[in-house]
Image (spheres, rainbow, N blue to C red):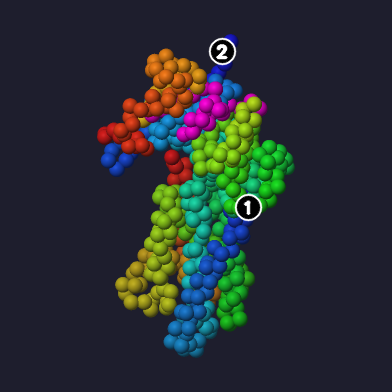
Amino acid sequence: MNTTLILARRAFREGIRQPDALLPTLFIPLFFLIVNVGQAAKIFPTSGTPFLAGQNYAAFQLPMSLITAASFGTAALYLVEEIEGGYFDKLRATPIPRASIVLGRLLAEVPKSILISTVMILVAFPFGVRIRAGIGGYLLIVLLIAGWALVFSGLMQLLALKTRSAAATNSGSLVFFPLLFLTPSLVPREQLSRPMEIAASLNPVTYVMETARSLTLYGYQWATIGRGFLVVGVGLAATLALSVRAVNRYD
Amino acid sequence: MTTTPAIQATELVKTYSGKDGEVQAVRGVSLSVEPGGIFGFLGPNGAGKSTTVRMLTTLMTITSGRAIVAGIDVASDPDGVRNKIGVALQEAGLDLRQTGRELLQLQGRLFAMSAADAATRADELLELVELTDAADRRIQGYSGGMKRRLDLASALVHRPEVLFLDEPTTGLDPASRIVVWDEVRRINEAGTTVFLTTQYLEEADQLCDQLAIIDAGLIIREGSPQALKDELAARVDLGREPSLDDVFLDATGRTRDRVAGQVQEVRS
């Protein structure tokens, strides 16, 4: 078996053994969902709010929560813990491609992200939220969100490799967090104020959110879906290339 | 007949870029370690011991100079070297969320063993370091001594020709230290060359056939423990048989007024 898969299996096993690290990933996005819907649902009733396309406001908010959950990856924190504890050097002293060390951890984020996205969609189901694009739409959403989880975790791993510090890696995730809110998180992009619309248009997270939202509310809008997957693809290629470069040059 | 050294370092230099300019942690270390022995590498904190070990074990690039380990050039074929060496660094580098058995099996897989071979080898090693009873417990529950023994075992998974141990007993209680010494002897008797860094002179005296003392990035004494003591006795009258402590102090004493742990700094 490829060393990346061997290390991914180890990382996944660790994730399962640390449910306390997984719970906030589920709890905080659900908390945001409930709070945002609670605050704004009356402003945006199903009838009379065209952008909801017949669903309630929770369906509009669900993609934001899915993306938030995907931005809570633990790969970087475990990596920096291993750097500080010395196990990272132990792995580097084995004759495996060094890229496997970071790619293995990243790969383990995929099933975790799929699991969390599925749980969140199921939780939203009793509240009347439906995926307009059906099963295929659900699959595209979890794939997209898993891709975003890899982009975010890849960036954090890069930070971990560069700083070798748990504190700096933690702070780094806080720096990226505001990006989640410079998005059309409460209303569609065209209804934002002009400065916010410009900021949201420059923010790649916007396109991921709009893709998940279009699949939830409107069905298959291929131009929107294409933009979302392009953003994730480019982000993934860039973060993977930078992470692999960083681990290969680690001294 | 001449034997190929297990480790041959020639004029090794490691330079870092610091905030105030260049820092030379190792300034031209040359040493030769014969196969089958236990080689002790001594020095005060910050003398360059760990940096030298990290260069020899492929974990750090070499600024200049050359290192051959187990007959393979470290710089040009690091994976070749990694297949021939075992490494146990200063911190017991372990993944605390795994069990001892899982850690050893994983290590075996990373050295290209099949799952069945890795499982068999893990069982052998757990028995060797007397951790069979704790094999299926998570490592985070192990004592310091148990972690050290597991770290040693993980360095032996692929039957290395040369074993690097960087301060293997630092932080251990005396009983655990003796257990680790016994393990090191046993490993060496099985044919593995051991390169050991330590700050404990008694440890070096007990275990090592050959020693080198490094200070400020340079080797300042080299030889067998007895030869180093004899050399000091011939040069200085202490009124008693010199100990390895005396040798160490004599070698490094000229820098006693320097702050312990500092490395030489060279402004570029």
Output the chain of dot 2: B
State how far apart marks 2 and 1 are (Cα): 47 Å
Q: Which residue is mark 2?
A: B2
In this rendering, the answer to whether B229 lies above or below B60 is above
Q: Does mark 1 fall on the same chain as mark 2?
A: yes
Q: Which residue is mark 1?
A: B138
Dot 1: few (<14), some (14–19), or many (≥20) neighbours within 10 Å? some
| Residues at circles 2 and 1 in contact by the CB criterion of under 8 Å | no
Query: What element does badge 2 sit on?
Result: loop
Dot 2: few (<14), some (14–19), or many (≥20) neighbours within 10 Å? few
- Asked if the stretch drawn in magenta spans residue B130, the answer is no
- Asked if the stretch drawn in magenta spans residue B200, the answer is yes
Please tell me which residue is depicted at 63% across the width and 71% down the height of the picture.
A135
Q: Please state which amino acid type lies under the numbered disc 2.
A: Thr
Q: Position of residue B85 (x, y in %)?
A: 57, 32
In this rendering, the answer to whether A25 lies above or below B68 is below
Query: What element does badge 1 sit on?
Result: loop
The answer to which image quadrant residue A137 occupies is: bottom right
The answer to which image quadrant residue A205 occupies is: bottom left
